[in-house]
Amino acid sequence: MGVLNVTPDSFSDGGAHAHLDQAVAHGLALFEAGADVVDVGGESTRPGAAAVDTAEERRRVVPVVRALRAAGAGPLSVDTTKAEVAAAALDAGADMVNDVSGLRFDPAMGPLVAQRGVPAVLMHLRGSFGTMHLEPRYREVMAEVAAELRAALARADRAGVRREQTIVDPGLGFAKDAGHTLEVLRRLPELAALGRPVLAGPSRKSFVGKVLERPPAQRLMGTAAAVAACILGGAHMVRVHDVREMVDVARMCDAILGEAA
Ligand code: PMM
């Protein structure tokens, strides 16, 4: 899954794709580089990022989805916690929803996903965008993440989302310090017990920066190591910025696992 952030303040690509033409060109380049799906997002989740209202988020995301579709590109995922933004993106041609709140922030999101019958990523996150980076505390991080993902699956069930349409994501770096994130990564195989495909997003994140003491632009090799750990640990999909490089990592991991690349 290639990352296409259409935000002026994204932590790792600095808003370079904020303009429509640039965003579309970058989305096409991600497919060209080997992405199987491109995830279009209009709200930064960076610590301290300003909240984006619904109208602004739609304004950022929808034209990009529409233009990529018009160019014949896809499949596309929309990275949003707001049902209204998701609905508009699906209307414009998006194929799936990536909700980092696991259907928790907007009560209308579950019913929307159910009604549209699209796949949905349910990510683990504690608290809100405003509070999640403040002293995350766990007694047993992996057990708690797994339990909270089970709760997200139950939320999806209650909304009428078919279980086969769900993908779970442990939310690397979300409401987790570097130690928590490394432990989740180490114990990723435990998520297989949830019985659903796993997506993981380690790309350029601060836990990589913490280990290597490098800024986002210098986290390529650290990301490669983390992507390999995700895939060897059972992830079915990885969400990354550096698609061309990570396709090689994924193909190599698949070969090690004895799976066709
Ligand atoms: N990470 C970010 C944004 N959206 N979605 C999913 N499903 N999983 C993630 O790990 C994830 C996400 C933050 O990273 P970015 O700002 O580089 O996009």
Image (spheres, grey):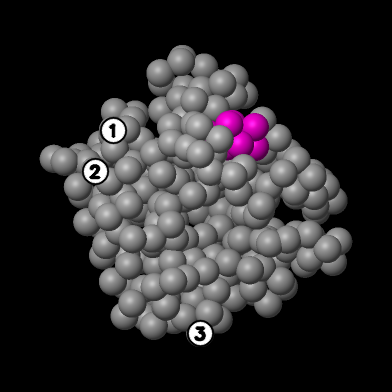
Residue 165 in view here: yes
Residue 216, located in which quarter of the rendered image? top right
Residue holding disc 2: 142
Q: Position of residue 176 (x, y in %)?
A: 32, 38
128 is higher (above) or lower (below) than 213 = below
Q: Amino acid at mark 1?
A: Glu
Tell me the CA gap for discs 1 and 3: 36 Å
Task: Kindly identify which numbered label has been placed on residue 115.
Answer: 3
217 sits to left or right of 46: right
Q: Which mark is residue 58?
A: none
Could you say which quadrant of the image residue 54 lies in?
A: bottom right
The C terminus lies in which quarter of the figure? top right
Q: Are marks 2 and 1 in contact (CB under 8 Å)?
A: yes
| Residue 185 to residue 192: above or below | above
Mark 1 secondary-structure assignment:
helix
User: Does residue 93 sit above or below 195 in this rendering?
Assistant: below
Q: Is residue 249 magenta?
A: yes
Q: Position of residue 186 (x, y in %)?
A: 32, 33
Going from N to C along the chain, the mark reached first, 1 or 3, is 3
Residues under labels 3 and 2: Cα distance? 32 Å
Q: Secondary structure at mark 3?
A: helix
Residue 113 left/right relative to 250: left
**In the rendered structure, which disc, 2 or 1, sits on the residue that comes first in sequence?**
2
User: Looking at numbered disc 2 in the image, what kind of residue is underneath it?
Assistant: Met
The mark tally for this picture is: 3
Q: Is residue 112 visible?
A: no
Q: What residue do we see at 32% from left, 52% from top?
A: 192
